[in-house]
Image (spheres, rainbow, N blue to C red):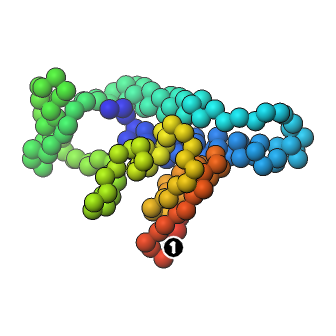
Amino acid sequence: DTLGGTCLNVGCIPSKSMLNNSHYYHMAETNDLRERGIEFDNLRLNLEQMLGEKRKSVQQLTSGIAMLLKSNKVAHIQGTGSISSPTEVTVSKPDGSTETVQTKNIIIATGSEVTPFPGIEIDEKTIVSSTGALSLEKVPKKMIVIGAGVIGLELGSVWKRLGAEVTCVEFLSTIGGV
């Protein structure tokens, strides 16, 4: 229910935040920082704090989008839209009312959804989507990532850096979206 779509809310941006912060942890854990003259004792992962920083990044950017819309006099209508005609969109608002908007052009930008696997239910606890993988409450001991595209590899890297044993599985002949 926030502006910014999949990339900003549950895709690219939170993934990059976790990728960046897990990199710092990994550098500390593997003594890379010590070799650079940065020494410390009692390294601990505070996953809750790391997830909080990810949420803060997303919140700041979504707020920025709202400000950009307002400053550029772009109307934002919250609700579920349906195309009523080639020049008309009807929005069902959360309060039950509807609003119809007349326009010359319509852009469909609905975001993305996880590809379902028959017989496998995503519960966001044990079997998680990429969205769920961005908010795990603890580092899993083992993780299998199905789909070795960009987001799958990034999230696999995050959890590997934080201590999980990660295996990536890809149907295609290439990985990383190439």
Q: In which quarter of the image is the N terminus?
A: top left
Residue topped by disc 1: 174
Can see residue 110? yes
**Horizontal arrangement in the rendering, residue 23 relative to residue 99 (left or right):** right
Instruction: Determine the secondary structure under disc 1.
Output: loop
Residue plotted at (51% across, 37% down)? 137
Q: Nearer the viewer, residue 121 or 108?
A: 121
Residue situated furthest bottom in the rendering: 173
In percent of width and height, residue 102 lies at 14, 37
Rendered location of residue 155, percent (x, y)? 53, 51
Which residue is painted at 47% across and 46% down in the image?
A: 133
Residue 141 horizontal/vertical position (percent): 57, 50
Question: Which class describes the residues within 10 Å of circle 1: few (<14), some (14-19), or many (20+)?
Answer: few
Q: Is 95 displayed left or right of 70 in the figure?
A: left
Comparing 20 with 75, the one in front is 20
- What residue lies at 82% left-to-right and 47% top-to-bottom? 31
